[in-house]
Amino acid sequence: MRRCDGATDEGGKKKGGEVGEFGKRLYICRQKQRILSMKFSMKSFAQYKKDAPNQITMANGAFYPDILKQACELYKPVLIYFGQLLATSASSEILLKEITKLTQTWMRIQLLRVFRKYVSPETSVEMLKSKNKIPMVCKNFGKDFRPIHIVQRKFNERPLPDEALCAVLWEYKDRGQKGYSLTESFFEIFQSKFPNYSIEGPKRAGADVQLADVFPDYPNPSRPVDFIIKDSKSNVLAIGLARYDSDRGGAQEDDRTGGYNNCAREILAYTKSKNLNVKIIFLNDGPGLLLGSMWDDYSKLENIDSKKIMVLTLRMINDRLTEEWLNS
């Protein structure tokens, strides 16, 4: 019987270095040993729970009231512009239509946020962003718009800049930025650790990767993911989704993990049908992981297929994301 070190137990011709069929068997044997070793030594996401606070990455935030000076400087032009449009608008509907005429995206979005606060708190900014939806918004919500003369009076009663409103607008400033920082950090760590592999996808802002563009016969043409990992031969090794959770809980928590569960099962069903050895990485980070049952819910994702699914934070990359796992 041959051992994995290449020797024979009965005086074989060569110890180690044999070529041909034996060399192949030796390679396979050693690979199996590595995989078994990795399997027994690698901790699951659930096993990090006791040390969870030390496993998450906290994004830097700004202190109140320190931000007020900068917030007022940033949003004072917005409030001045809103006041000018407000003074010349005969109705709240006309004010909305005038705001949506602006072509400068950032200014238009800020003005819509101010409009929502003063005129129509029940309508979302997302709803107001689309110019094509404005007639529908006016038809369905216009009757509940605050009358223009009251908006004008209320606006003129406030100081300019209005510190309170500037502080509210400031809260929107970095939305999404923490998620961008997470993926950017992951890309940099990954490329440093695996120089022979490539990672594709938006490093910060940008369009998601559509799996239908990666696998032309993928059954769900609208399945977005955040990144794709490939080897030196452009074979897909892993599909990744990344999220920074600042604060989650309740229905939001259920929606997030439920969506991940469906996504994982859909991808695994496809790769299994095509006999593809593709892993799924859920990169999640932030203090939201410590809320409610979030950590346990993410842990359950690995239970779907512990060999092919990995949930990790940035601080777990060195210990858990290995070349052996990607290729196993």
Image (cartoon, rainbow, N blue to C red):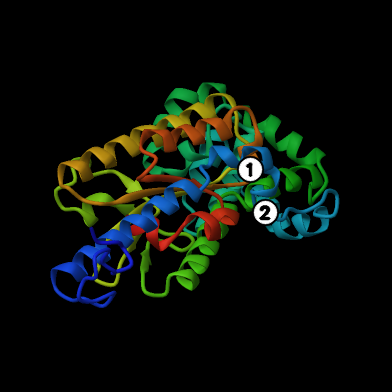
Q: Amino acid at mark 2?
A: Ala
Residue occupying the point 28% across, 42% down:
267
Inter-mark Cα distance, 1 to 2: 9 Å
Instruction: Inspect this view and state whether residue 107 appears.
Output: no
The 10 Å Cα crowd at callout 1, few under 14, some 14 to 19, many 20 or more, is: some
The image's mark for residue 246 is: 1
Q: Is residue 234 above or below residue 284?
A: below
In the rendered image, the quadrant that contains the N terminus is bottom left
The picture places residue 84, in percent across and down from the top left corner, at 65, 51
The 10 Å Cα crowd at callout 2, few under 14, some 14 to 19, many 20 or more, is: some
Local secondary structure at mark 2 = loop
The quadrant where residue 236 appears: bottom left
Q: Nearer the viewer, residue 59 or 38?
A: 38
Q: Is residue 186 left or right of residue 54?
A: left
Q: Nearer the viewer, residue 52 or 34?
A: 34
* Farthest residue, direction right: 65
Q: Amino acid at mark 1?
A: Ser
| Residue on which disc 2 sits | 59
The picture places residue 283, in percent across and down from the top left corner, at 49, 49
The picture places residue 247, in percent across and down from the top left corner, at 64, 37
Local secondary structure at mark 1 = loop
Q: Is residue 275 left or right of residue 243?
A: left
Asked if the residues shown at circle 1 and circle 2 are in contact, with their CB atoms under 8 angstroms apart, the answer is yes
Considering only order in the chain, which callout, 2 or 1, is on the residue closer to the N terminus? 2
